Amino acid sequence: MRSVFCLLLTWLLVGVHLAKAGDCVVTGAPAILDSKPVEWIIVIASGQSCLRGLRSGGMTLESVVVSTPAKFGEVTVQGYGFSYRAPRDYKGEDSFSVTISGANRGIHGSSIIRVSVSVR
């Protein structure tokens, strides 16, 4: 338990975003609409869903698009976020990309979020 706490604290101290909802854990730096790709990792249980919002701070999103669909699971846009559903009885790796565009603190831009998924 202590090692998990230390790992979480380290992630938070180095600016890595961590969100837990049900059986999914999402890690990765927030997208800031600066044209640089962002890498995220989702760890999820087989058959479960993960809902992830994409707005932060002074950000206004104009569009959220699944730019590369998942190979095994299902990704759908949910307002200013996305939902990933892992296939039932599947264990392994998956991936997809989401492209967001809008303005961050008044500066327009876009970001591609590349998501690697580990289904347990």
Image: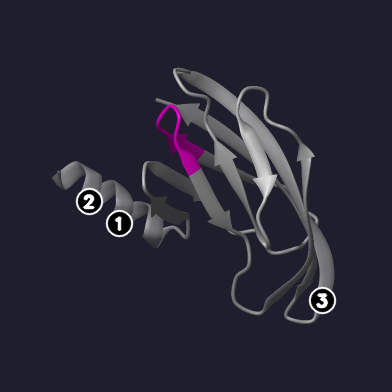
Which residue, given by chain and number where applicable, does mark 1 sit on? Answer: 9
Q: Quadrant of residue 103?
A: bottom right
Which sits in the foreground, 70 or 56? 70
Q: Residue 66: horizontal and vertical position, in percent? A: 76, 44
From the image, tell me which residue sits under label 3: 107
Q: How far is mark 2 from mark 1, CA to CA?
A: 6 Å
Cα separation, mark 3 vs mark 1, equals: 31 Å
Characterize the local packing of mark 1: few (<14), some (14-19) or many (20 or more) Cα atoms within 10 angstroms. Answer: few
The span picked out in magenta is 42-49
Residue beneath the point at 73% across and 33% down: 69
Q: Is residue 67 left or right of residue 28?
A: right
In-front residue for pair 6/89: 89
Quick check: is 100 in the magenta stretch?
Answer: no
Residue at x 62%, y 61% (from the top left corner): 54
Q: Residue at x 44, y 18 (%)?
A: 89
Q: Residue furthest left?
A: 2
Name the amino acid type tagged 2: Phe
Q: Tell me the element at label 2.
A: helix
Examine the rendering and report whether any part of residue 29 can be seen.
no
Quadrant for residue 101, please give it. Answer: bottom right
Residue at position x 48%, y 28% in the image: 118
Q: Secondary structure at mark 3?
A: strand
CB atoms of marks 2 and 1 within 8 Å: yes
Q: Is residue 44 magenta?
A: yes
| Residue identified by numbered label 2 | 5
Check disc 3 and give the amino acid type: Ile
